[in-house]
Image (cartoon, rainbow, N blue to C red):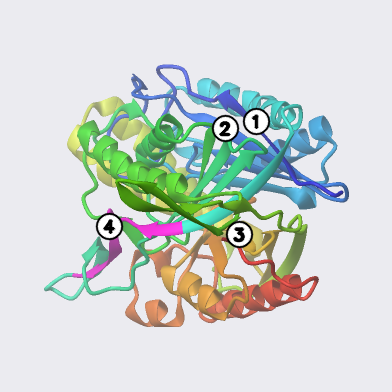
Amino acid sequence: MNKLFAGVGRCDITPAPGTPQGGWGAQTHERGSYADIPLYSTALVLADEAESTIILDVDSIGFNEEWTEKIISAVENMTGVHRDRIRFSCTHTHSGPNTFRLETIGQGLEQVLSYLESLPARIAGAAWQAQRNLVPIRFAAGWGSCDINVNRRFRTPEGQMVVGRNWDGAVDRKVSVIRFDDLDERPVATILHYACHPTIMAWENKLFTPDYPGVARKTVEEQVGGMCLFLQGAAGNLGPRRGFTGDKRVYRRFGTLLGLEASRIALNIETIPRREHYCGVLQSGAPIALYDDHADESPTPILHVMNRSVSMPLRRFPSPAGLAQEAKDRARELIEIRKSGARDEVSAATARATQAGWLAQVSQMYIGRSAVDWRLQCIRIGSVALLSTRGEPFVETSQQIAAGSPFPFTLFSGYSNGAFGYIPTREAFQEGGYETENTPLAPGAAELLAAEGIDLLKEMEALSPIVPVV
Protein backbone atom coordinates (compact mmCIF):
# COMPACT_ATOMS: atom_id res chain seq x y z
CA MET A 1 0.00 0.00 0.00
CA ASN A 2 1.30 3.43 -0.97
CA LYS A 3 2.16 5.60 2.07
CA LEU A 4 2.97 9.23 2.67
CA PHE A 5 6.19 9.97 4.53
CA ALA A 6 7.51 13.10 6.23
CA GLY A 7 10.76 14.10 7.88
CA VAL A 8 12.09 17.31 9.40
CA GLY A 9 15.51 18.85 9.90
CA ARG A 10 16.88 22.12 11.22
CA CYS A 11 20.05 24.17 11.18
CA ASP A 12 20.97 27.26 13.22
CA ILE A 13 21.75 30.17 10.85
CA THR A 14 22.18 32.88 13.48
CA PRO A 15 24.76 35.47 12.32
CA ALA A 16 27.81 36.31 14.41
CA PRO A 17 27.81 39.48 16.54
CA GLY A 18 28.92 42.44 14.47
CA THR A 19 27.42 41.21 11.19
CA PRO A 20 25.79 44.13 9.33
CA GLN A 21 22.02 44.44 9.46
CA GLY A 22 20.14 45.77 6.47
CA GLY A 23 16.39 45.59 6.84
CA TRP A 24 15.79 49.35 7.07
CA GLY A 25 16.68 52.36 5.00
CA ALA A 26 16.21 54.54 8.08
CA GLN A 27 18.69 52.75 10.35
CA THR A 28 21.76 54.68 11.49
CA HIS A 29 23.83 51.69 12.65
CA GLU A 30 25.45 49.05 10.46
CA ARG A 31 26.45 46.15 12.67
CA GLY A 32 24.00 44.08 14.69
CA SER A 33 25.02 43.46 18.30
CA TYR A 34 23.82 39.91 19.05
CA ALA A 35 20.84 37.57 18.58
CA ASP A 36 17.84 37.94 20.87
CA ILE A 37 16.69 34.45 19.85
CA PRO A 38 18.23 32.14 17.22
CA LEU A 39 17.51 32.25 13.51
CA TYR A 40 16.87 28.90 11.83
CA SER A 41 16.53 27.08 8.56
CA THR A 42 13.89 24.36 8.93
CA ALA A 43 13.25 21.69 6.30
CA LEU A 44 10.24 19.44 5.74
CA VAL A 45 10.56 16.56 3.28
CA LEU A 46 7.37 14.93 2.00
CA ALA A 47 7.56 11.75 -0.05
CA ASP A 48 5.58 8.83 -1.39
CA GLU A 49 6.61 6.05 -3.73
CA ALA A 50 6.54 8.33 -6.76
CA GLU A 51 7.28 11.86 -5.57
CA SER A 52 9.50 13.77 -3.16
CA THR A 53 9.45 17.46 -2.30
CA ILE A 54 11.32 19.73 0.12
CA ILE A 55 9.85 22.78 1.84
CA LEU A 56 12.40 25.15 3.38
CA ASP A 57 11.52 27.81 5.96
CA VAL A 58 14.44 30.24 6.35
CA ASP A 59 14.69 33.17 8.78
CA SER A 60 15.82 35.84 6.33
CA ILE A 61 14.54 38.97 4.63
CA GLY A 62 15.36 37.25 1.34
CA PHE A 63 18.07 36.70 -1.26
CA ASN A 64 18.77 37.87 -4.76
CA GLU A 65 18.73 35.44 -7.68
CA GLU A 66 22.46 34.67 -7.40
CA TRP A 67 22.31 33.48 -3.80
CA THR A 68 18.95 31.79 -4.28
CA GLU A 69 20.50 29.77 -7.09
CA LYS A 70 23.49 28.81 -4.92
CA ILE A 71 21.26 27.68 -2.05
CA ILE A 72 18.81 25.68 -4.18
CA SER A 73 21.70 24.08 -6.10
CA ALA A 74 23.31 23.00 -2.82
CA VAL A 75 20.04 21.46 -1.62
CA GLU A 76 19.55 19.69 -4.94
CA ASN A 77 23.10 18.31 -4.97
CA MET A 78 22.99 17.09 -1.37
CA THR A 79 19.52 15.52 -1.45
CA GLY A 80 19.09 14.45 -5.06
CA VAL A 81 15.68 16.17 -5.17
CA HIS A 82 15.18 18.13 -8.39
CA ARG A 83 15.06 21.90 -7.99
CA ASP A 84 11.51 22.03 -9.39
CA ARG A 85 10.45 20.13 -6.27
CA ILE A 86 12.25 22.40 -3.81
CA ARG A 87 10.37 25.29 -2.22
CA PHE A 88 12.75 27.83 -0.72
CA SER A 89 10.72 30.24 1.40
CA CYS A 90 11.87 33.14 3.59
CA THR A 91 10.02 34.48 6.60
CA HIS A 92 11.04 38.01 5.49
CA THR A 93 12.25 39.15 8.90
CA HIS A 94 13.63 42.70 8.74
CA SER A 95 15.89 42.26 11.75
CA GLY A 96 18.22 39.65 10.35
CA PRO A 97 21.58 40.19 8.62
CA ASN A 98 21.99 42.26 5.47
CA THR A 99 21.78 39.68 2.69
CA PHE A 100 20.61 41.80 -0.23
CA ARG A 101 21.86 45.41 0.00
CA LEU A 102 25.57 44.68 0.04
CA GLU A 103 26.46 47.80 -1.94
CA THR A 104 25.40 50.02 0.99
CA ILE A 105 27.71 48.30 3.51
CA GLY A 106 30.55 50.43 4.79
CA GLN A 107 31.81 48.16 7.58
CA GLY A 108 31.65 44.39 7.87
CA LEU A 109 31.23 43.38 4.23
CA GLU A 110 33.63 40.49 4.75
CA GLN A 111 31.42 39.17 7.57
CA VAL A 112 28.29 39.27 5.43
CA LEU A 113 30.03 37.51 2.56
CA SER A 114 31.36 34.86 4.94
CA TYR A 115 27.85 34.41 6.34
CA LEU A 116 26.29 34.13 2.86
CA GLU A 117 28.92 31.65 1.72
CA SER A 118 28.14 29.40 4.69
CA LEU A 119 24.40 29.25 4.05
CA PRO A 120 24.09 26.89 1.05
CA ALA A 121 25.78 23.98 2.86
CA ARG A 122 23.98 24.68 6.14
CA ILE A 123 20.52 24.93 4.58
CA ALA A 124 21.22 21.85 2.44
CA GLY A 125 22.28 20.04 5.61
CA ALA A 126 18.87 20.66 7.20
CA ALA A 127 17.18 19.17 4.12
CA TRP A 128 19.57 16.20 4.16
CA GLN A 129 18.74 15.60 7.82
CA ALA A 130 15.01 15.73 7.05
CA GLN A 131 15.43 13.07 4.38
CA ARG A 132 16.96 10.74 6.93
CA ASN A 133 14.14 11.28 9.40
CA LEU A 134 11.36 10.10 7.09
CA VAL A 135 8.53 8.21 8.79
CA PRO A 136 5.05 7.18 7.61
CA ILE A 137 2.60 9.91 8.50
CA ARG A 138 -1.01 11.01 8.48
CA PHE A 139 -2.00 14.64 8.21
CA ALA A 140 -4.94 17.01 8.51
CA ALA A 141 -5.49 20.75 8.30
CA GLY A 142 -7.50 23.41 10.06
CA TRP A 143 -7.76 27.15 10.46
CA GLY A 144 -8.48 29.90 12.94
CA SER A 145 -7.91 33.64 13.26
CA CYS A 146 -5.41 36.08 14.77
CA ASP A 147 -5.61 39.87 14.65
CA ILE A 148 -1.96 40.93 14.93
CA ASN A 149 -1.98 42.27 11.33
CA VAL A 150 -3.51 45.26 9.55
CA ASN A 151 -3.47 46.73 6.05
CA ARG A 152 -0.42 48.99 5.98
CA ARG A 153 -1.24 51.33 3.05
CA PHE A 154 -2.35 54.47 4.89
CA ARG A 155 -3.22 57.80 3.31
CA THR A 156 -2.24 60.71 5.53
CA PRO A 157 -4.51 63.72 6.08
CA GLU A 158 -2.15 65.56 3.72
CA GLY A 159 -2.92 63.02 0.99
CA GLN A 160 0.34 61.05 0.93
CA MET A 161 0.20 57.25 0.67
CA VAL A 162 2.59 55.87 3.31
CA VAL A 163 3.31 52.68 5.23
CA GLY A 164 1.13 52.81 8.35
CA ARG A 165 -2.17 51.39 9.63
CA ASN A 166 -5.24 51.37 7.39
CA TRP A 167 -8.01 49.88 9.51
CA ASP A 168 -10.47 49.98 6.60
CA GLY A 169 -8.15 48.27 4.12
CA ALA A 170 -8.22 44.68 2.93
CA VAL A 171 -6.75 42.21 5.42
CA ASP A 172 -6.64 38.44 5.92
CA ARG A 173 -6.42 37.26 9.53
CA LYS A 174 -6.76 33.55 8.77
CA VAL A 175 -4.29 31.26 10.54
CA SER A 176 -3.88 28.06 8.52
CA VAL A 177 -2.31 24.99 10.10
CA ILE A 178 -1.30 21.59 8.74
CA ARG A 179 -0.39 18.92 11.26
CA PHE A 180 1.68 15.86 10.35
CA ASP A 181 1.65 12.93 12.79
CA ASP A 182 3.36 9.56 12.77
CA LEU A 183 1.11 6.48 12.74
CA ASP A 184 0.84 6.62 16.54
CA GLU A 185 -0.48 10.21 16.37
CA ARG A 186 2.74 11.74 17.67
CA PRO A 187 3.40 15.13 16.04
CA VAL A 188 6.20 15.17 13.49
CA ALA A 189 5.72 18.63 11.97
CA THR A 190 3.32 21.55 11.88
CA ILE A 191 3.03 24.12 9.10
CA LEU A 192 1.85 27.55 10.25
CA HIS A 193 0.74 29.91 7.47
CA TYR A 194 -0.03 33.59 8.14
CA ALA A 195 0.35 36.91 6.32
CA CYS A 196 2.05 39.86 8.02
CA HIS A 197 5.28 41.75 7.43
CA PRO A 198 7.80 40.89 10.17
CA THR A 199 8.53 44.58 10.78
CA ILE A 200 7.80 44.79 14.48
CA MET A 201 11.49 45.28 15.24
CA ALA A 202 12.56 48.37 13.33
CA TRP A 203 15.45 50.69 12.46
CA GLU A 204 16.51 51.45 16.05
CA ASN A 205 16.81 47.72 16.82
CA LYS A 206 20.35 46.28 16.89
CA LEU A 207 19.34 42.73 17.85
CA PHE A 208 19.19 39.90 15.34
CA THR A 209 15.73 38.33 15.56
CA PRO A 210 13.39 36.24 13.42
CA ASP A 211 10.67 38.71 14.58
CA TYR A 212 7.25 37.28 15.42
CA PRO A 213 7.51 34.15 13.15
CA GLY A 214 10.34 32.74 15.28
CA VAL A 215 8.38 33.15 18.52
CA ALA A 216 5.25 31.68 16.93
CA ARG A 217 7.22 28.64 15.78
CA LYS A 218 8.74 28.15 19.22
CA THR A 219 5.34 28.40 20.88
CA VAL A 220 3.84 25.76 18.59
CA GLU A 221 6.73 23.39 19.24
CA GLU A 222 6.35 23.82 23.00
CA GLN A 223 2.59 23.29 22.97
CA VAL A 224 2.17 20.69 20.21
CA GLY A 225 5.51 18.94 19.78
CA GLY A 226 7.52 18.15 16.66
CA MET A 227 9.00 20.92 14.52
CA CYS A 228 7.10 23.92 13.17
CA LEU A 229 7.61 25.65 9.84
CA PHE A 230 6.37 29.20 9.29
CA LEU A 231 5.24 30.03 5.75
CA GLN A 232 4.74 33.73 5.10
CA GLY A 233 1.53 34.57 3.22
CA ALA A 234 0.69 37.39 0.81
CA ALA A 235 1.96 40.19 3.04
CA GLY A 236 2.88 42.83 0.46
CA ASN A 237 0.39 45.30 1.93
CA LEU A 238 -0.04 43.82 5.42
CA GLY A 239 1.93 44.79 8.50
CA PRO A 240 1.72 44.39 12.28
CA ARG A 241 -0.89 46.42 14.11
CA ARG A 242 1.91 47.56 16.37
CA GLY A 243 5.32 47.73 14.78
CA PHE A 244 8.33 49.86 13.90
CA THR A 245 9.70 49.60 17.41
CA GLY A 246 12.88 48.66 19.19
CA ASP A 247 10.99 47.02 22.05
CA LYS A 248 11.57 43.27 21.82
CA ARG A 249 8.64 42.61 24.15
CA VAL A 250 6.25 43.50 21.33
CA TYR A 251 7.43 40.91 18.81
CA ARG A 252 7.61 38.29 21.54
CA ARG A 253 4.03 39.03 22.61
CA PHE A 254 2.63 39.05 19.07
CA GLY A 255 4.52 35.87 18.18
CA THR A 256 3.12 34.20 21.28
CA LEU A 257 -0.44 35.26 20.38
CA LEU A 258 -0.09 33.81 16.88
CA GLY A 259 1.65 30.68 18.18
CA LEU A 260 -1.02 30.00 20.77
CA GLU A 261 -3.78 30.29 18.17
CA ALA A 262 -1.88 27.97 15.83
CA SER A 263 -1.37 25.55 18.72
CA ARG A 264 -5.07 25.60 19.54
CA ILE A 265 -5.86 24.74 15.93
CA ALA A 266 -3.20 22.02 15.76
CA LEU A 267 -4.25 20.39 19.03
CA ASN A 268 -7.86 20.36 17.87
CA ILE A 269 -6.92 18.52 14.66
CA GLU A 270 -7.27 14.74 14.54
CA THR A 271 -5.15 13.15 11.87
CA ILE A 272 -7.04 9.84 12.12
CA PRO A 273 -10.68 10.27 11.06
CA ARG A 274 -13.05 8.54 13.45
CA ARG A 275 -16.64 7.43 13.04
CA GLU A 276 -18.93 7.43 16.06
CA HIS A 277 -20.80 4.17 16.77
CA TYR A 278 -23.42 4.03 19.54
CA CYS A 279 -23.12 0.75 21.49
CA GLY A 280 -25.81 1.00 24.16
CA VAL A 281 -26.28 2.20 27.74
CA LEU A 282 -24.38 1.46 30.94
CA GLN A 283 -26.29 1.83 34.22
CA SER A 284 -24.02 3.65 36.68
CA GLY A 285 -26.23 5.78 38.88
CA ALA A 286 -26.95 7.81 35.77
CA PRO A 287 -27.57 5.97 32.49
CA ILE A 288 -24.41 6.52 30.38
CA ALA A 289 -24.35 6.17 26.62
CA LEU A 290 -21.45 4.04 25.38
CA TYR A 291 -19.64 4.67 22.11
CA ASP A 292 -17.00 2.90 20.08
CA ASP A 293 -15.21 5.44 17.88
CA HIS A 294 -13.88 3.53 14.87
CA ALA A 295 -10.80 4.84 13.12
CA ASP A 296 -11.34 5.21 9.39
CA GLU A 297 -8.47 4.37 7.09
CA SER A 298 -8.75 7.00 4.38
CA PRO A 299 -6.88 6.59 1.09
CA THR A 300 -3.34 7.92 1.00
CA PRO A 301 -3.56 11.51 -0.32
CA ILE A 302 -1.95 12.37 -3.60
CA LEU A 303 1.38 14.21 -3.39
CA HIS A 304 2.26 16.19 -6.47
CA VAL A 305 4.30 19.26 -7.43
CA MET A 306 3.75 21.49 -10.44
CA ASN A 307 5.48 24.66 -11.61
CA ARG A 308 4.35 27.31 -14.04
CA SER A 309 6.17 30.28 -15.54
CA VAL A 310 4.04 33.40 -15.87
CA SER A 311 5.10 36.17 -18.27
CA MET A 312 4.63 39.23 -16.07
CA PRO A 313 4.55 42.73 -17.62
CA LEU A 314 7.43 45.06 -16.71
CA ARG A 315 7.44 48.80 -16.17
CA ARG A 316 9.75 50.97 -18.26
CA PHE A 317 13.15 51.82 -16.85
CA PRO A 318 15.59 54.60 -17.77
CA SER A 319 19.08 53.85 -19.10
CA PRO A 320 21.05 51.78 -16.56
CA ALA A 321 24.29 53.73 -17.14
CA GLY A 322 23.06 56.89 -15.46
CA LEU A 323 21.33 54.98 -12.67
CA ALA A 324 24.51 52.97 -11.97
CA GLN A 325 26.49 56.15 -11.56
CA GLU A 326 23.81 57.62 -9.32
CA ALA A 327 23.92 54.47 -7.16
CA LYS A 328 27.71 54.73 -6.83
CA ASP A 329 27.46 58.39 -5.89
CA ARG A 330 24.78 57.73 -3.26
CA ALA A 331 26.74 54.80 -1.80
CA ARG A 332 29.89 56.97 -1.62
CA GLU A 333 27.88 59.77 -0.01
CA LEU A 334 26.56 57.38 2.62
CA ILE A 335 30.04 56.14 3.51
CA GLU A 336 31.31 59.70 3.90
CA ILE A 337 28.37 60.73 6.08
CA ARG A 338 28.96 57.72 8.31
CA LYS A 339 32.60 58.68 8.67
CA SER A 340 31.68 62.25 9.58
CA GLY A 341 29.63 61.07 12.53
CA ALA A 342 26.58 63.11 11.46
CA ARG A 343 24.10 60.53 12.73
CA ASP A 344 21.06 62.69 12.04
CA GLU A 345 21.95 62.60 8.31
CA VAL A 346 22.72 58.87 8.10
CA SER A 347 19.08 57.79 7.95
CA ALA A 348 18.25 59.96 4.92
CA ALA A 349 21.52 59.04 3.18
CA THR A 350 20.86 55.33 3.72
CA ALA A 351 17.40 55.68 2.21
CA ARG A 352 18.82 57.50 -0.84
CA ALA A 353 21.55 54.91 -1.34
CA THR A 354 19.10 52.03 -0.96
CA GLN A 355 16.65 53.48 -3.49
CA ALA A 356 19.36 54.35 -6.00
CA GLY A 357 20.92 50.90 -5.68
CA TRP A 358 17.61 49.17 -6.25
CA LEU A 359 16.83 51.24 -9.36
CA ALA A 360 20.28 50.57 -10.80
CA GLN A 361 19.95 46.81 -10.25
CA VAL A 362 16.50 46.39 -11.75
CA SER A 363 17.20 48.66 -14.70
CA GLN A 364 20.29 46.60 -15.51
CA MET A 365 18.23 43.40 -15.27
CA TYR A 366 15.18 44.53 -17.23
CA ILE A 367 16.19 47.33 -19.62
CA GLY A 368 14.73 46.74 -23.07
CA ARG A 369 12.41 43.98 -21.86
CA SER A 370 8.63 44.13 -21.71
CA ALA A 371 8.06 41.03 -19.57
CA VAL A 372 9.78 38.73 -17.08
CA ASP A 373 9.20 35.06 -16.27
CA TRP A 374 7.70 34.78 -12.79
CA ARG A 375 7.54 31.36 -11.16
CA LEU A 376 4.46 29.84 -9.58
CA GLN A 377 4.86 26.58 -7.66
CA CYS A 378 2.13 24.36 -6.25
CA ILE A 379 2.63 21.49 -3.82
CA ARG A 380 -0.50 19.42 -3.46
CA ILE A 381 -1.03 17.17 -0.44
CA GLY A 382 -4.48 15.66 -0.81
CA SER A 383 -7.01 18.45 -0.42
CA VAL A 384 -4.36 20.98 0.64
CA ALA A 385 -2.65 23.18 -1.93
CA LEU A 386 0.50 25.15 -1.07
CA LEU A 387 0.77 27.74 -3.84
CA SER A 388 3.80 30.02 -3.76
CA THR A 389 5.44 32.69 -5.86
CA ARG A 390 8.37 35.08 -5.91
CA GLY A 391 8.18 38.62 -4.61
CA GLU A 392 5.60 40.25 -2.37
CA PRO A 393 1.98 39.75 -3.49
CA PHE A 394 -0.87 41.76 -1.99
CA VAL A 395 -3.59 40.27 0.18
CA GLU A 396 -6.25 40.92 -2.48
CA THR A 397 -4.42 38.52 -4.81
CA SER A 398 -4.45 35.84 -2.12
CA GLN A 399 -8.16 36.34 -1.52
CA GLN A 400 -8.89 36.14 -5.24
CA ILE A 401 -6.92 32.90 -5.57
CA ALA A 402 -8.56 31.31 -2.52
CA ALA A 403 -12.02 32.21 -3.84
CA GLY A 404 -11.30 30.57 -7.20
CA SER A 405 -9.44 27.52 -5.90
CA PRO A 406 -11.04 24.04 -5.99
CA PHE A 407 -9.08 23.08 -2.85
CA PRO A 408 -10.73 23.59 0.56
CA PHE A 409 -7.32 24.48 1.99
CA THR A 410 -5.40 26.86 -0.29
CA LEU A 411 -2.35 28.49 1.31
CA PHE A 412 -0.94 31.18 -0.99
CA SER A 413 2.49 32.65 -0.23
CA GLY A 414 5.07 35.03 -1.59
CA TYR A 415 8.76 35.26 -0.62
CA SER A 416 9.56 31.91 -2.24
CA ASN A 417 12.25 30.76 -4.65
CA GLY A 418 14.05 34.09 -4.87
CA ALA A 419 13.65 37.59 -6.28
CA PHE A 420 12.36 40.79 -4.74
CA GLY A 421 9.61 43.07 -5.92
CA TYR A 422 6.12 44.02 -4.82
CA ILE A 423 3.16 42.78 -6.88
CA PRO A 424 0.61 45.59 -6.41
CA THR A 425 -2.97 45.42 -7.65
CA ARG A 426 -4.26 47.79 -10.34
CA GLU A 427 -6.07 49.75 -7.65
CA ALA A 428 -2.83 50.17 -5.70
CA PHE A 429 -1.05 51.50 -8.79
CA GLN A 430 -3.79 54.11 -9.13
CA GLU A 431 -3.34 55.10 -5.48
CA GLY A 432 0.48 55.26 -5.69
CA GLY A 433 2.79 54.81 -2.72
CA TYR A 434 5.92 52.96 -1.69
CA GLU A 435 5.03 49.51 -3.01
CA THR A 436 4.11 50.81 -6.48
CA GLU A 437 7.34 52.79 -6.68
CA ASN A 438 9.48 49.82 -5.62
CA THR A 439 8.39 47.17 -8.08
CA PRO A 440 9.78 46.15 -11.46
CA LEU A 441 6.27 45.07 -12.50
CA ALA A 442 3.62 46.99 -14.40
CA PRO A 443 -0.12 47.32 -13.68
CA GLY A 444 -1.96 44.11 -14.47
CA ALA A 445 0.75 41.78 -13.16
CA ALA A 446 -1.13 40.91 -9.96
CA GLU A 447 -4.35 40.13 -11.79
CA LEU A 448 -2.47 37.95 -14.30
CA LEU A 449 -0.74 36.11 -11.46
CA ALA A 450 -4.07 35.42 -9.74
CA ALA A 451 -5.64 34.07 -12.94
CA GLU A 452 -2.66 31.83 -13.66
CA GLY A 453 -2.59 30.64 -10.05
CA ILE A 454 -6.25 29.62 -10.16
CA ASP A 455 -5.69 27.85 -13.47
CA LEU A 456 -2.72 25.94 -12.02
CA LEU A 457 -4.78 24.90 -8.99
CA LYS A 458 -7.58 23.63 -11.23
CA GLU A 459 -5.04 21.67 -13.26
CA MET A 460 -3.69 20.12 -10.06
CA GLU A 461 -7.17 19.18 -8.85
CA ALA A 462 -7.98 17.52 -12.18
CA LEU A 463 -5.22 14.95 -11.53
CA SER A 464 -7.50 13.07 -9.12
CA PRO A 465 -10.65 13.69 -7.05
CA ILE A 466 -10.08 15.60 -3.81
CA VAL A 467 -10.18 13.50 -0.66
CA PRO A 468 -11.77 15.72 2.03
CA VAL A 469 -9.60 16.58 5.03
CA VAL A 470 -11.45 15.90 8.27
Q: Mark 1 — residue?
A: 123
Cα–Cα gap, marks 4 and 3: 23 Å
Q: Nearer the viewer, residue 356 or 434?
A: 434
Q: Mark 2 — residue?
A: 41
Q: Mark 3 — residue?
A: 388
- Which three-letter amino acid code belongs to the residue tagged 3? Ser
- Left or right, 344 with reference to 190: left
Name the secondary structure under disc 4: loop
Task: Identify the mark nearer the N-term, 1 or 2.
Answer: 2
- Is 148 magenta? The answer is yes
* Above/below status of 151 relative to 105: below
- Which three-letter amino acid code belongs to the residue tagged 1? Ile
- Which three-letter amino acid code belongs to the residue tagged 4? Asp
The quadrant of the picture occupied by the C terminus is: bottom right
* Above/below status of 406 relative to 344: below
* Above/below status of 78 relative to 237: above
Q: Mark 4 — residue?
A: 147
Cα–Cα gap, marks 2 and 4: 26 Å
- Is 266 magenta? The answer is no
In the rendered image, the residue lying farthest to the top is 17
Q: Main secondary structure of the magenta part?
A: strand
- Is disc 2 surrounded by few (<14), some (14 to 19) or many (20+) residues within 10 Å? many
Q: Nearer the viewer, residue 148 or 446?
A: 148
Disc 3 to disc 1: CB gap under 8 Å: no
In percent of width and height, residue 322 lies at 53, 58
- Left or right, 220 with reference to 162: right
* Above/below status of 109 relative to 183: above
Judged by depth in the image, the label closer to the viewer, 1 or 4, is 4
